[in-house]
Image (spheres, rainbow, N blue to C red):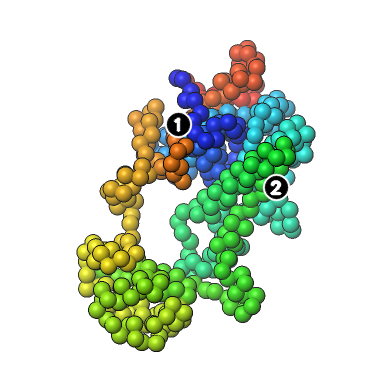
Amino acid sequence: MTQPQPVGPLQDLKVVEICSTIAGPACARLLADFGAEVTKVEPLQGDGARQMGFHVEDVSLYAASLMRGKRSVALDLKTPQGRDIALELIRRADILVENNRPGVMERLGLGYDTLAALNPRLIMVRISGYGQDGPYSDRPGYGAICEAFGGVRHMTGDPDRPPARVALATTDYLTAVYAAMGALVAVHERQRSGLGQVVDAALYETAFSQMESYVPTYEKTGFVPARVGPNLPTMAPNSLYPTGDGGWILIAANSDAVYGRLVALMQMPELLSDARFATIKARGIAANMKALDAHIGEWTSRHEGAALELLLRGAGVPTSRIYTIADIYQDPHYAARQMLLQVPHPKLGHTTQIGVVPRLSRTPGVVRHTGPDTGADTRRVLAELGLDDARIDQLMDRGTVAEPTR
């Protein structure tokens, strides 16, 4: 099969990925979507992400998306020969993305000082739970753990229940975006200095960055925010409200102008004249928020969700019913914006994957191919490094490298 050629604004960048699970692979996937040549180095048994999520005919649907646009090299980094191959790949690379626990790369002989001596232009993106230094840097950390440490879990859920979680890897994905941004900032700076550097992205700092509004508030007032359920803290009305058909609708009337349009639609002018609800600041007080939500909930419960959504949109009030993945597949906007892509797959025919984000008008990203099997490109990549078939076969026999079994 002919390997698709790199296309997109990052097609001149070569990236090596030595990552597992989500944050690191998602960062490299972002770069691949925009044309970077990403070579994923994974263990002989494959990245653990290949075991996550649902499988069809023993195909990991998650890996098909998370590893799209990349080349896969199965390599034992604990062997001297495997390390030498990795070093040669990194010597030719612009960016290395890794999300191992701090110290692991150094023990493998792949620390930044070693790599920078080999390739001074290398940008090394390091994703970890707590960062590369500090007293907690050696702690293992997943996104969920770092959400707890970063203050986010304390803010998630209903006030009368234990802290909840969003059943998605939100902190991992946001960290991937921060890490990709850091990599491209470093690429930009390298144009002036000619030198690479380390991009240190910590999961807990990603989580903590969402607490931005409360950091100065606590220092000046001592206010400790807490869970407020579906509401947006200090902003109302912005919450979930019941509908007459047993569903829920989210209404966000944050500004005075939008709030005025909502009140007019509800035909409750007293909600404008009442001092508790007359200003944004007043509506943000907890007791006033609760009282206002009760009025709005009583009104929304008289309408079916779809009809209510049309009424609110017609009045210029931001709103949406709570969508499931099934609703998303039926919505024409997702299709029009190419957010549900059918990507060809050699075994399944195709898999539907999320579209490329963000959209660029002149040099958009593109999904070149589905996620490859473990080691699908081992032989091709080693040949690019100058190894002949006999040497590659020898490394295969020794268990240093691997390719898919035929």
User: Compared to 164, does 262 lie above or below?
Assistant: below
* Disc 1 target residue: 368
* Disc 2 target residue: 102
The residues tagged by marks 2 and 1 sit, at their Cα atoms, a distance apart of 32 Å
User: Residue 348 in the image: x percent, y percent?
Assistant: 36, 31
Q: Is residue 164 visible?
A: yes
As shown in the figure, which amino acid type bears the numbered disc 1?
A: Arg
Disc 2 secondary structure class: loop
User: Residue 81 in the image: x percent, y percent?
Assistant: 70, 25
Residue placed most toward the observer, 198 or 385: 198
Q: Quadrant of the N terminus?
A: top left
Residue placed most toward the observer, 280 or 338: 280
**How packed is label 1: few (under 14 Cα within 10 Å), some, or many (20 or more)?**
many
Name the quadrant containing residue 339.
top left
Name the quadrant containing residue 319.
bottom left
Front: mark 2 or 1 = 1
Q: Residue at x 42, y 34 (%)?
A: 58
Q: Answer left or right for 380 relative to 263.
A: right
Q: Earlier in the sequence, mark 2 or mark 1?
A: 2
Residue placed most toward the observer, 161 or 147: 147
As shown in the figure, which amino acid type bears the numbered disc 2?
A: Pro
